[in-house]
Amino acid sequence: MALDFVAGCLGGSAGVIVGHPFDTVKVRLQVQNVDKPLYRGTFHCFQSIIRQESMFGLYKGIGSPMMGLTFINAIVFGVQGNAMRRLGQDTPLNQFLAGSAAGAIQCIICCPMELAKTRMQLQGTGEKKSKKRLYKNSLDCLVRIYKKEGVRGINRGMLTTLIRETPAFGFYFLTYDILTRSLGCEPEDRFMIPKLLFAGGMSGIASWLSTYPADVIKSRLQADGVGGVNQYNGIADCVRQSWQKEGWRVFTRGLTSTLLRAFPVNAATFATVTLFLMYMRGEDEGLKDCEPAPALQQQQQQPSSL
């Protein structure tokens, strides 16, 4: 369990560093005002942020996921591993159920973390040096929101996070299970690392595609109130207003940058975690293949941060 925890932290950190710029672009595209759009698409958003805010603009809000991933991974690994042991059999359905349970429970940490991240990513949009910084950092952001709105405020978007994360983690573990069973890999296999990278990357893409519309709504609800104006009264009102103003395409806003982020983030996470576990446990105790198996190897399936 301790090794899985450390490995998850390492893999999660690698994933955050690789994918955060894409996440910033995703959030900016998801919540921008359709009447006065700042960005024409993914590539234009990248260009604009770098030109207007420097490279550091792409890493706004990175402190929140870097702090939260330790707890998220600990929860996910513990819940998923225990769920698989209780379910008994290593079947695709059980993989989905165990992953879904892990995804649901980690929302306790994930929701406040993503709220702070979203608010930080939107702060100082278009400014190289913010003239008026409302939040000093991610922790200060959460403290200020708590003082103003209480517990309900720091859990803004919790229901949409739950709707997104529960099936997403289920599909994540299910896809990884299917791919690793299909590919197979031994420690001496010279293609083991490419196989791990591919399986992890494709699992991340599958998990995002399964629940992406919910992520758009979550981002809009968590960004609502920035600038002092609340636009939505809840999930249903957000869906209705978004649909009326922008049509069905609103639910795919930022999808390109999300998928560009999903593959390298999850590929880096899986490769880092698996290689760390194999090194620490030694070849004799290492993975016999990259296929998830019951008991010990159940905890070697490593989820991403989403």
Image (cartoon, rainbow, N blue to C red):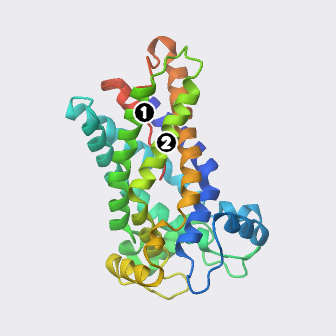
- The residue labelled by disc 1 is 179
Residue 226 percent location from the top left of the image: 53, 81
Snapshot quadrant of residue 192? top right
- Nearer to the camera, 231 or 112: 231
In contact (CB < 8 Å): disc 2 and disc 1? yes
285 left or right, relative to 124: left
Circle 1 sits in a helix, a strand or a loop, which is it?
helix
Distance in Å between CA atoms under marks 2 and 1: 9 Å
- The residue labelled by disc 2 is 202
Task: Identify the amino acid type marked 2.
Answer: Met
218 left or right, relative to 91: right
Q: Residue at x 45, y 25 (%)?
A: 290
Residue 61 percent location from the top left of the image: 60, 63
Answer whether residue 9 is visible to the viewer in this image: no
Snapshot quadrant of residue 44? bottom right
Q: Mark 2 vs mark 1: which is more N-terminal?
A: 1
Q: Residue at x 42, y 69 (%)?
A: 218
Q: Is residue 211 above or below residue 223?
A: above
Q: Residue at x 59, y 44 (%)?
A: 264
- Nearer to the camera, 292 or 282: 292
Q: Residue at x 63, y 70 (%)?
A: 136
Q: Is residue 176 above or below residue 290?
A: below
Residue 14 percent location from the top left of the image: 60, 43
Circle 2 sits in a helix, a strand or a loop, which is it?
helix
